[in-house]
Image (cartoon, rainbow, N blue to C red):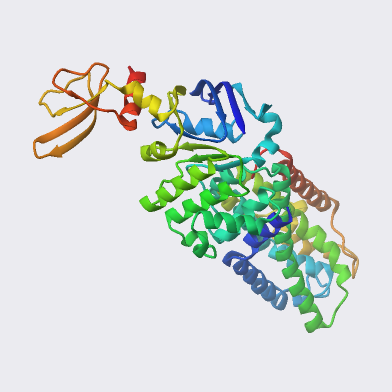
């Protein structure tokens, strides 16, 4: 599966520009992380990728064919989990998935439903009504419906929100396995999710792509811009403090800056540091 | 799409609301039949099409509410949140809307059918009367057009704002309390109590031309609104 996004822009009817001149190539097998601050333009990008919005300019090609002209065929290859979604509370998880399988036009619906229930560890709760499930279990039903029919392109928007750490690791591994032969786009605020499974990271800010590459490349770009130091009474405006830790010797600060001050000790950047530095640089 | 249709129908029918409204229709219907219809309307027989039409007209507000409650399954805020998932599937939006429309109309017909069955049982056991065919015309003239209009107009309103459907449920109750022109006389029950008195004795079932036009327009508007909903691009 290959998705080509060319000069994509999206402006809402109220004039707010959500995306500006986005160009990207996404190709399977790959697990692509999508990060950006709130309001950066991630949801519009994902909605455009599921044909839920109409672009103001530019094109999206799926395997070389314009998405708009081949929407039905494209959607047969698509699995989507939005950040906010509803399920039919009065139905059981199994019934909801059978319904979604029917909408997806799957032939062996029962088999497909059993497979995804097993994938998301929800077999025991398959007969429970949605309204009786916990937030994490509902989220798992959401993930399960996206996985139905083994789509070749999976889009997950904050899929691990509401899941406990053990479940998060389970789903990270699940996404990682899926990405062995599929294209998976994972939008998340949880840096560990990106760090542990994504082989590519896209950072979007103010509707523009600020970075596209491997997490390692982003970290390398930040070398020499991360430091630690003991907290000082006066604030240094050039520093952007990313963490404060109470230690036996006082408060230790971690910060990113274009030029490190003499009193600070350079530190090896993490992906979080690199991301924050990128966003800071984009703001200035 | 058969699976989707069955699933939609199950959502509409296997819930407390359906059984509640069904019980209300049957209870109120029984009270009407045993209290008013058994006496005959406008000096016609209790089993006359006039009395049966009056029975349906009086039940109409409950059937209207039932139809609109079915609709809330497709227009609620919760449904809108679910639409982000269903909208990303490969299903043809028009076929999907068509299937939902069929499920809605079938649910509506089941409620109406229960009311008709109750009357049929009442006429058979109480009055030993079995000429069901003569009841078809009042059924089609009195009940079907307003209910199809309820479905079409409710869908339009619910698409704009889910809460409008609940407000729209009050419409027949408000109309039943108003003095209405003859063309709308079915809504407050006055027409079927007075019109037969203007006709020769033992009249066949007929309605004034203005009423036929009004009912025809309601049916047409209902069908058009449902068609608009199905054929316009985008989901419910």
| A278 relative to A152 in the view: left or right | left
Front in this rendered view, residue B149 or B41 = B149
| B235 relative to A283 in the view: left or right | right
Front in this rendered view, residue A4 or A90 = A4
- Residue at horizontal 64 percent and vertical 58 percent from the top: A111
- Residue at horizontal 79 percent and vertical 70 percent from the top: B51
Q: Position of residue A175 (x, y in %)?
A: 49, 44
Asked whether the viewer can see residue B170, the reply is no
Front in this rendered view, residue B16 or B122 = B16
- Residue at horizontal 18 percent and vertical 31 percent from the top: A253
- Residue at horizontal 35 percent and vertical 28 percent from the top: A275
Asked whether the viewer can see residue A274, the reply is yes
- Rendered image quadrant of residue B236: top right
Total label count? 0
Q: Position of residue B172 (x, y in %)?
A: 65, 56
Q: Position of residue B14 (x, y in %)?
A: 62, 66
User: Image height check: is A31 above or below B205?
Assistant: above
User: Image height check: is A236 above or below B12?
Assistant: above
Front in this rendered view, residue B132 or A12 = A12
Q: Position of residue B119 (x, y in %)?
A: 76, 74
User: Image height check: is B113 above or below A130?
Assistant: below
């Amino acid at each position: 599966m290959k998705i080509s996004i060319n000069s994509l822009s999206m402006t809402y009817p109220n004039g707010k520009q959500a995306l500006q001149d986005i160009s990207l190539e996404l190709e399977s097998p790959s697990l692509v992380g999508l990060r950006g601050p709130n309001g950066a333009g991630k949801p519009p990008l994902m909605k455009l990728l599921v044909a839920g919005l109409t672009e103001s300019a530019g094109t999206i090609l799926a395997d070389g064919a314009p998405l708009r002209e081949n929407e039905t065929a494209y959607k047969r290859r698509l699995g989507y989990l939005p950040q906010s979604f509803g399920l039919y509370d009065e139905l059981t998880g199994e019934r909801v998935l059978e319904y979604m399988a029917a909408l997806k036009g799957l032939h062996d619906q029962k088999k497909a439903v059993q497979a995804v229930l097993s994938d998301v560890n929800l077999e025991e709760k398959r007969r429970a009504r949605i309204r009786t499930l916990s937030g994490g279990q509902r989220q798992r039903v959401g993930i399960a419906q996206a996985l139905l029919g083994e789509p070749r392109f999976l889009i997950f928007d904050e899929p691990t929100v509401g899941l406990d750490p053990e479940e998060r690791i389970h789903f990270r591994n699940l996404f990682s396995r899926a990405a062995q032969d599929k294209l998976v786009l994972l939008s998340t605020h949880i840096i560990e999710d990106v760090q542990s499974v994504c082989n590519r990271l896209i950072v979007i800010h103010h509707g523009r792509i600020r970075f596209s590459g491997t997490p390692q490349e982003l970290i390398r770009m930040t070398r020499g811009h991360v430091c630690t130091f003991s907290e000082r009474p006066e604030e240094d405006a050039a520093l952007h403090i990313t963490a404060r830790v109470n230690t036996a010797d006082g408060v230790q600060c971690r910060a990113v800056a274009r030029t490190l001050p003499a009193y600070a000790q350079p530190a090896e950047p993490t992906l979080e540091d690199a991301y924050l530095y990128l966003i800071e640089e984009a703001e200035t | 799409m058969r699976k989707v249709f069955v699933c939609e129908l199950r959502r509409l029918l296997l819930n407390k609301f359906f059984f509640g409204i069904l019980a209300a229709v049957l209870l109120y219907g029984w009270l009407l039949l045993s209290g008013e219809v058994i006496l005959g309307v406008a000096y016609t027989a209790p089993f006359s099409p006039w009395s049966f039409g009056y029975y349906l007209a009086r039940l109409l507000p409950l059937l209207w509410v039932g139809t609109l409650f079915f609709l809330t399954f497709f227009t609620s805020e919760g449904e809108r949140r679910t639409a982000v998932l269903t909208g990303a599937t490969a299903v043809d939006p028009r076929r999907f809307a068509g299937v939902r429309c069929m499920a809605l109309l079938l649910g509506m017909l089941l409620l109406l059918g229960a009311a008709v069955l109750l009357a049929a049982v009442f006429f058979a056991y109480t009055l030993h009367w079995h000429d069901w065919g003569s009841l078809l015309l009042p059924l089609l003239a009195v009940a079907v057009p307003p209910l199809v209009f309820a479905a079409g107009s409710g869908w339009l309103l619910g698409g704009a704002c889910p809460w409008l459907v609940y407000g729209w449920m009050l419409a027949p109750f408000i109309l039943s309390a108003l003095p209405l022109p003859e063309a709308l006389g079915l809504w407050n029950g006055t027409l079927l109590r007075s019109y037969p008195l203007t006709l020769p004795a033992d009249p066949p079932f007929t309605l004034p031309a203005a009423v036929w036009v009004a009912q025809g327009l309601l049916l047409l508007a209902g069908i058009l609104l449902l068609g608009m909903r199905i054929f316009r691009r985008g989901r419910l």
